[in-house]
């Protein structure tokens, strides 16, 4: 039995297991029937992890044999596993924004790191690998599939912003080119404050990608970046505010069984705290925030942010959700890389 509030699991029971252990056990149920009911939930939130973190860690444990597999049929989830790769899936595609379709063969480089481009693709079928090119060679970050997007909003709105990763086809892939004119009109209607929030999402994903590279190459910058910083949000805190940095800096850190992992470095203009309409898999449930002594951060009116988000076109919402999925998955990749070091 699993209890959900606003789509997020808060507690679970499976035999003698409770909480997150019981929820992970369900990943072994590769066949079965599920019934959903509306009823009173436990007051205490025992499961702190976000949805994407739970999915990725559950699939990893199942693949590693840490979770008992019950049944013989393949489970259908919003991720897939192929040749050891977890393929992230995004929301359903809104074809009203797709103006052209293109197909690429395995290994084709759709995007080259360091190049410029003001277009956004959506993956219609297949998968692509996100790769960071480094002096020590290419570093794979994540693999994304149906419903996820290629290209950031920042690079779309500003063609001078260089691509920060390469994208290569993992098998045959079909992508849809989004209507640039329609997207430009949509983004032009977004308020300055919400637009700065979107840019902060892109910055966070880029920073977490940097951390993945560091972890995979055996570099740990955490002691250096934590110097003279104190926690302003502890991992697992019941923090319900979203704050915008107006002075100073902060870092996002996750505590794991193998130690702390640096996820992201936040600067002036970035946001941290609880985002009620997106699951980033970071703070407050799955990470802490440490800040410099001179940090000044203003609280954001969440009611205003939520109202604007609710009015966004479906494709714009899908782009933000895809960014959140990639953020959560990249954070998990960084932690897994730390574990293997």
Image (cartoon, grey):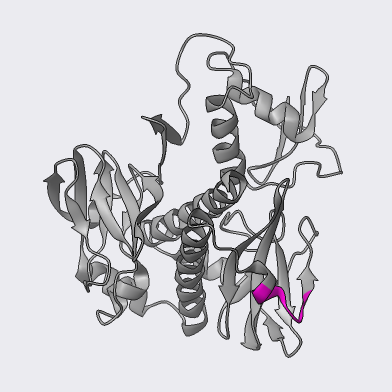
The quadrant of the rendering that contains the N terminus is: top right
Q: Is residue 299 above or below residue 239?
A: below
Image x and y of residue 169, in percent: 23, 46
In percent of the image, x 55 and y 84: which residue is there?
Answer: 269
Q: Is residue 301 visible?
A: no
In percent of the image, x 45 and y 75: which residue is there?
Answer: 199
Magenta-span inclusion, residue 225: yes
Q: Nearer the viewer, residue 219 or 27?
A: 219
Residue 338 shown left or right of residue 170 in the figure: right
In percent of the image, x 59 and y 12: which residue is there?
Answer: 70
Q: Is residue 121 above or below residue 23?
A: below
Residue 202 shown left or right of residue 22 in the figure: left
Single out the residue that lies furthest toward the top: 72
Q: Nearer the viewer, residue 255 or 135?
A: 135
Residue 162 shown left or right of residue 17 in the figure: left
Which corner quadrant of the image does residue 81 belong to?
top left
Image x and y of residue 118, in percent: 23, 72
Q: Is residue 77 visible?
A: yes
Image x and y of residue 226, in percent: 71, 74
Magenta-span inclusion, residue 321: no
Q: Nearer the viewer, residue 115 or 278?
A: 115
Q: Is residue 32 above or below residue 93?
A: above
Magenta-highlighted residues: 224-230
In percent of the image, x 43 and y 59: which residue is there?
Answer: 317
């Amino acid at each position: 039995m699993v209890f959900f509030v606003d789509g997020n699991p808060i507690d679970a029971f499976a035999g003698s297991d409770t909480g997150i252990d019981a929820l992970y056990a369900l990943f072994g149920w590769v066949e079965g029937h599920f019934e959903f009911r509306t009823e009173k939930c436990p007051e205490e939130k025992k499961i702190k992890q976000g949805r994407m973190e739970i999915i990725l860690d559950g699939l990893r444990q199942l693949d590693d044999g840490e979770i008992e597999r019950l049944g013989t049929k393949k489970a259908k989830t919003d991720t897939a596993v192929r040749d050891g790769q977890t393929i992230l899936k995004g929301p359903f595609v809104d074809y009203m924004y797709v103006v052209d379709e293109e197909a690429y063969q395995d290994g084709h480089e759709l995007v080259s790191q360091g190049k410029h481009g003001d277009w956004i693709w959506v993956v219609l079928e297949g998968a692509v690998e996100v790769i960071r090119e480094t002096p020590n060679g290419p570093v794979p970050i994540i693999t994304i599939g149906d419903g996820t997007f290629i290209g950031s909003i920042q690079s779309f709105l500003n063609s001078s912003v260089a691509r920060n990763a390469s994208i290569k086809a993992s098998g045959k892939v079909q992508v849809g080119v989004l209507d640039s004119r329609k997207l430009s009109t949509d983004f032009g209607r977004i308020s300055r404050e919400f637009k700065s929030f979107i840019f902060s999402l892109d910055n966070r994903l880029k920073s977490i990608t940097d951390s993945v590279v560091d972890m995979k190459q055996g570099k740990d910058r955490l002691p250096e970046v934590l110097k003279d910083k104190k926690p302003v949000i502890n991992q697992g805190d019941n923090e319900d505010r979203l704050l915008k940095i107006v002075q100073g800096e902060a870092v996002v850190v996750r505590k794991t069984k193998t130690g702390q992992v640096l996820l992201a470095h936040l600067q002036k203009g970035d946001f941290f705290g609880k985002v009620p309409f997106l699951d980033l898999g970071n703070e407050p449930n799955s990470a802490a925030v440490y800040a410099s002594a001179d940090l000044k951060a203003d609280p954001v009116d969440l009611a205003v942010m939520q109202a604007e988000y609710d009015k966004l076109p479906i494709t714009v919402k899908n782009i933000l959700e895809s960014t959140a999925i990639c953020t959560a998955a990249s954070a998990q990749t960084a932690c897994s890389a730390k574990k293997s070091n």
